[in-house]
Amino acid sequence: MYLANSISLSDAISVYLDWKRTYTTTAYDSYKLRLGDLTAYFGEESILQEITPIHIASFINHLKQKPLKNGGVLSLSTVSYSIDIIRNFFDFWRGRGVSNINPKEIKRIRHVKKYKEVVTKDDFEEMIETLDERYYSDLVKKLAIHLLWDTGMRVSELCDLKLADLGGQKENGLRSAMIRTRKTMRYNLAVWGQETNRLLNIYLGLRLDMEVAHDYLFCSRRGGSNPITRRTIERWVKDTADQAMIDKPISPHSFRHGKAHHMLDQGANQRDIVAVLRHANPVSTFHYLSLNENRFLEVAGKYL
C-alpha cells in the first residue's frame, strides 16, 4: 500500500515504531529517541523517498557534532548505535519497496568500545557489608543486590518481577522465579540461594503489612503504589558502591557480566552460562566472556 504514494518521514517513523513495538518493548523508547534526531534534521514533512545516502552521510556528520546540554558532544558509541537504528529503519522500508537506500551504503563508524565493568565477588561482598538489614531501606537494597548477583538477571527483569512469579522454597534452600525477558518476550527460570531467600522472606513478611496497589515485588517506596523503576535500582547500586568505596563505575548490568565471569572462574562451560543468563542467542554469551582475564591467562599459559 506504500508504493502508490509518497510517505513523509514522520509517518514512516511512526509506522516503523508501531511495527517495532509488536515484538520488543525495550528498544521502542531508544529507537524513538534516535529516529527523532532524524526527523529534527530533515523536517517532519520531508519525503522518505527523497532521502539519499549523501543526505544520510551529512546527517551522521551532524550527529558527531551534536552538542549535549551538559557540554560536549555525542559519544562515538552513541553515534554508532544511532547509525545501526537508521540502517534498520531504511532496511524496513526498502524491504517494502518504498526506500531505494541500500542499508549497506550507510557506513558504520569505527570507535573504541567502552570497557564493561564487571562486579567481582569481592565487590559484591563489600557492597553487602555496608548495608544494615535492620533498616527497611537497606534491606530492600540488600535484597535487590543479592538477586542481581545470584541470578544475573537484567534490571528490567528485576523491575518486572511479581509476587505471583515466585516459586516455593526447595528442600536445598534454593528458590526460583519465572521471569519474562522484555528483549525476547520469553519466560525463563531464575534461581537464587539460601541467603538471598532469607532476605526475601524477611522482606515478604514486611510487605504483607503494606497496602500496595500492585503485585510487583518491589515498590517505589515503602507502601508506594508504583512499582520500582530502572533508575531507582541504578541509583541503589551506585550509592552502595560509593559507600563501599569501590573505585569503578558499577551498574546493575555489571552484575550480569560478573555472574558470567564468576561462573567461568568456577569451571562452568559456555552452555551452563547460556542457561543461567537466559541468552536466546549463545553468541551473546561470548561478548560477556571476552574480558575474563583469569581464563585467558589460564588458556594462554598452557601454550607458552
Image (cartoon, rainbow, N blue to C red):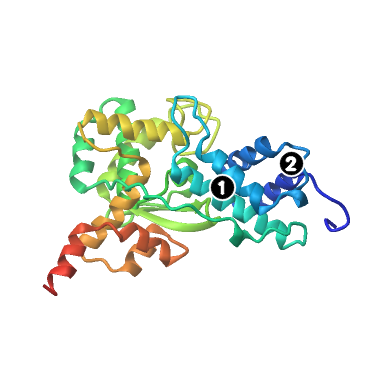
Q: Earlier in the sequence, mark 2 or mark 1?
A: 2
**Mark on residue 10?**
2
Task: Give the number of the disc on residue 71.
Answer: none
Q: Which residue lies furthest to the bottom in this view?
A: 303
Residue 36 against residue 84 in the figure, above or below: above
3D distance between C-alphas at marks 2 and 1 = 18 Å
Q: In this view, does 145 lie to the left or right of 211?
A: left
Find out whether the residues at labels 2 and 1 contact each other: C-beta distance under 8 Å: no
Residue at image location 74% in from the left, 44% down from the top? 9
Give the quadrant of the C terminus: bottom left
Disc 2: CA contacts within 10 A as few (<14), some (14-19) or many (>=20): many
Q: In which quarter of the image is the N terminus?
A: bottom right
Q: Is residue 108 left or right of residue 248?
A: right
Residue at the (30%, 29%) spot, across then down: 239
Mark number displayed over residue 27? 1
Residue 283, given in percent of the width and then of the height, sits at 42, 65
What amino acid is at disc 2? Ser
